[in-house]
Amino acid sequence: MIRLFLGQLTAIHEHGTFHGKVGPFNFFATEQKALGKMVMHSIEGEFGLEMDTISYYEFRNLIQSPYRKPESSAVTRTLETLHKAMHAKDIVGKERLVIAQNHLVDLLNYLEKKLSYSYFPATRKKRRSRLEAS
């Protein structure tokens, strides 16, 4: 299941946004790794070192910091797209997000069923995208 999920995410990433264009929400492997390192850190937990993420507000401050170099064109394009959009239907590249979100829902459902434990009592709903329909 995890291999299938990663394979599908890779396929989405390689195809770019709708119509094959590289645009917002398209982060190549090096940027994904850099962003991951930016938001993840180790903390001392109940069972030793544990991984944790920074808050949205800390991330926003890091992204907007004049000391962050070099500037990420993918982050800039994505933020510009989100700021310009008046409605979700105006967001270019949202199809890739819908597909990725649906795969995350599948992965969470699989893991929770395997572990017999869920953090979320509500049923997760999947969205339909134009990319999946084609």
Image: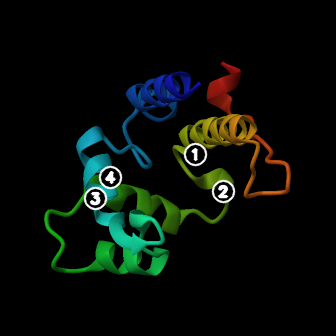
Q: Are marks 3 and 2 in contact (CB under 8 Å)?
A: no
Name the residue that disc number 3 marks: 37
For the residues bearing labels 3 and 1, Cβ distance under 8 angstroms: no
- Residue 117 in the image: state x and y as whole percent: 75, 49
Q: Foreground mark, 2 or 4?
A: 4
Q: Is residue 76 above or below residue 63?
A: above
Residue pushed farthest top?
134
The reply to whether callout 1 and callout 4 are in contact (CB within 8 Å) is no
Label 4 residue SS? helix
From the viewer's perspective, is residue 68 above or below residue 110?
below
Q: Amino acid at mark 1?
A: Lys
Q: CA distance from mark 3 to mark 1?
A: 24 Å
Q: Quadrant of residue 77?
A: bottom left
Q: CA distance from mark 3 to mark 2?
A: 29 Å
Q: Which residue is mark 2?
A: 88
Residue at the disc numbered 1: 94
Q: Position of residue 123 (x, y in %)?
A: 85, 49
Question: Which is more N-terminal, label 1 or label 2?
Answer: 2
Tell me the SS state at disc 3: helix
Return the residue nearer the eye: 49 or 127.
49
Residue 36 locus on image (x, y percent): 33, 55
Q: Residue at x 42, y 57 (%)?
A: 78
User: What's the CA distance linking mark 1 and mark 4?
Assistant: 14 Å
Q: Are marks 2 and 1 in contact (CB under 8 Å)?
A: yes
Question: Which image quarter holds the C terminus?
Answer: top right
| Residue 109 position in % (x across, y down) | 72, 39
